[in-house]
């Protein structure tokens, strides 16, 4: 806390006006510790004023007067990163902080800004001096307005040199300015064009790593500087090469600011012209040999399989998609990826016992760590409609939880939706096989709600129980996105019941298992 308190005192003494600092919505959300979707909703409702998609720190402080900057998690993280940076500088092993060159470049830029601010203040003081002299001359030559001019001159002198020092200006945006200044030293913000997506680069990460961790589907291939598929053009801001790359950019590309996002980081806030996968058709078909990390038995019918891809051949996919897993001589089967594309090296699959299928039987009973599997894909259209900020209802019927889990993790990473609610409907509590995971999300995330439901009977009964519960929880079933996975009969019943009670049909997305 000492570093931050020192910064606040320093900034107050220099009387910088926080109104001058506009921050993006993503950054503003991080500063006050609320989901981006919540902030966007308040802007849309006219509760918070924005200017071309940005907010002034003063306006942000007005809207969140009770934000506890000294207690909030962002501040704690900043302190942790600074402490780690100091520790790492001693042991020459920087892991979570930006490297020293990047830090130095950012501090240089802030020094330049400070120098310009000082120059501007000195210019204003010169103007005041000239004004004083001219007022004095006027008072001496225009007797009829003499009294008024003398009064004006005295007022000006009093403003410039008060008898008693003025208290620091009261501006509740000041603590936010302090946090934002620190944030700009240890992180840089990236804005992608044409999508408008934004993310922060923390530590010594490349632009690509940070974009993927933020849940964005940036174009890339090898992640290693060899293929050139991660090319992007810097529209504004400064970048720095942090890893050598074998792929050769042409002179024309370099002249136009083209970089490889897997080999560069951002020194300042930057705007990039970068391609992102917008639909499943933008993701190439891949064939990867991956290794088993571990197989975790959950109960007698479900095991969770953890698989790791090679570092230089990760799986590009969209949350909710599936791949074919195969083992020589045992055939192949489609499995949903039950993890988030933000961690493209570590994939998770939920294996349901099936003694009639030799591949599934092998995956369930006979796999060992380091065994290899072939992955082909991805395929499937059950993916998140990422830019929507409406509340999202995730509904897993029985074993339909695997793709829903991937979607939830992705939605949490994107932080765009106003709220997320998971309903897991099963005929027996043992079929809700990752109850602890769902409760952990619910405990950790303010905007995430979880409702487990036991429903006995046929598909119609399960669908009707679900809709009854939804109507108890929400005043209206419209204006929400629904993602439903499970047996095709129960999905159809649920879809019809939802539409009948007000849900928009084209906002219901389903996956039959
Ligand atoms: S992803 Fe292959 S060069 Fe960057």
Image (spheres, grey):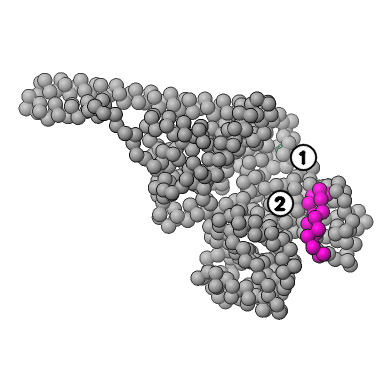
The x and y percentages for residue 296 are 80, 55
Residues in magenta, as a range: 292-307
The x and y percentages for residue 433 are 74, 63
The x and y percentages for residue 318 are 68, 53
**Which residue is at the front of the view, 282 or 146?**
146
Circle on res. 312: 1
| Residue found 46% across the figure and 47% down from its top | 67
Beta carbon at label 1 within 8 Å of ligand 1: no
**In this view, 480 is above or below 234:** below
**Which residue is at the front of the view, 303 or 504?**
303
Q: CA distance from mark 2 to mark 1?
A: 15 Å
| Residue found 62% across the figure and 50% down from its top | 413
Circle on res. 317: 2
| Residue found 72% across the figure and 69% down from its top | 429
Q: Quadrant of ligand 1?
A: top right
From the image, which quarter does the C terminus lie in? Answer: bottom right
Circle on res. 300: none
**Picture quarter containing residue 321?**
bottom right
Answer left or right for 79 relative to 244. left
Residue 257 seen in render: no
Residue 294 in magenta?
yes
2 and 1 marks in contact (CB < 8 Å): no
SS of the residue at dot 1? loop
């Amino acid at each position: 806390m000492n570093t931050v308190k020192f910064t606040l005192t320093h900034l107050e003494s220099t009387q910088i006006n926080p109104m001058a600092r506009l921050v993006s919505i993503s950054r503003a959300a991080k500063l006050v510790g609320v989901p981006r979707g919540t902030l966007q909703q308040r802007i849309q409702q006219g509760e918070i004023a924005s200017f071309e998609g940005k907010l002034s720190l003063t306006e942000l402080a007005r809207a969140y007067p009770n934000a506890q900057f000294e207690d909030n998690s962002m501040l704690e993280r900043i302190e942790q990163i600074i402490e780690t940076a100091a520790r790492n500088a001693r042991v020459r092993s920087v892991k979570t902080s930006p490297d020293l060159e990047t830090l130095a470049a950012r501090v240089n830029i802030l020094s330049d800004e400070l120098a310009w601010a000082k120059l501007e203040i000195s210019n204003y003081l010169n103007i005041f001096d000239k004004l004083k002299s001219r007022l004095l001359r006027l008072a001496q030559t225009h007797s009829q307005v003499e009294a008024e001019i003398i009064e004006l001159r005295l007022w000006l002198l009093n403003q410039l040199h008060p008898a008693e020092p003025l208290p620091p200006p009261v501006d509740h945006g000041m603590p936010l300015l302090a946090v934002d200044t620190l944030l700009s030293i240890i992180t840089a913000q990236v804005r992608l064009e044409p999508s408008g997506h934004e993310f922060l680069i923390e530590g010594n990460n490349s632009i690509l790593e940070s974009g993927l961790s933020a849940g964005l589907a940036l174009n890339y291939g090898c992640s290693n500087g060899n293929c050139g598929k991660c090319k992007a053009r810097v529209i504004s801001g400064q970048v720095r090469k942090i890893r050598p790359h074998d792929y050769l950019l042409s002179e024309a590309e370099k002249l136009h600011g083209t970089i490889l996002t897997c080999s560069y980081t951002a020194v300042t806030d930057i705007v990039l012209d970068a391609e992102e996968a917008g639909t499943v058709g933008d993701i190439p078909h891949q064939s990867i040999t991956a290794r088993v990390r571990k197989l975790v038995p959950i109960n007698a019918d479900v095991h969770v399989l953890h698989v790791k891809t090679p570092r230089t051949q990760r799986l590009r996919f969209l949350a909710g998609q599936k791949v074919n897993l195969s083992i020589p001589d045992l055939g192949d089967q489609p499995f949903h990826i039950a993890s988030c594309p933000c961690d493209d090296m570590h994939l998770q699959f939920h294996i349901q016992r099936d003694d009639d299928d030799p591949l599934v039987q092998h995956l369930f009973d006979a796999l060992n760590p380091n065994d290899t599997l072939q992955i082909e894909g991805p395929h499937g259209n059950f993916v998140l409609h990422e830019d929507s900020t409406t509340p999202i209802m995730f509904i897993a019927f029985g074993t339909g939880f695997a793709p829903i889990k991937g979607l939830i993790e992705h939605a949490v990473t994107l932080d765009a939706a106003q709220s997320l609610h998971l309903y897991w409907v099963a005929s027996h509590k043992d079929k809700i096989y990752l109850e602890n995971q769902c409760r952990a999300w619910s405990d950790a995330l303010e905007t995430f709600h979880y409702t487990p439901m036991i429903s006995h009977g046929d598909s119609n009964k399960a669908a009707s129980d679900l809709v009854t519960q939804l109507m108890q929880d929400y005043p209206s079933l419209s204006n929400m996105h629904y993602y439903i996975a499970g047996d095709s009969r129960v999905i159809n019943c649920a879809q019809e019941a939802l539409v009948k009670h007000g849900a928009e049909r084209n906002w219901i997305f389903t996956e039959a298992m």
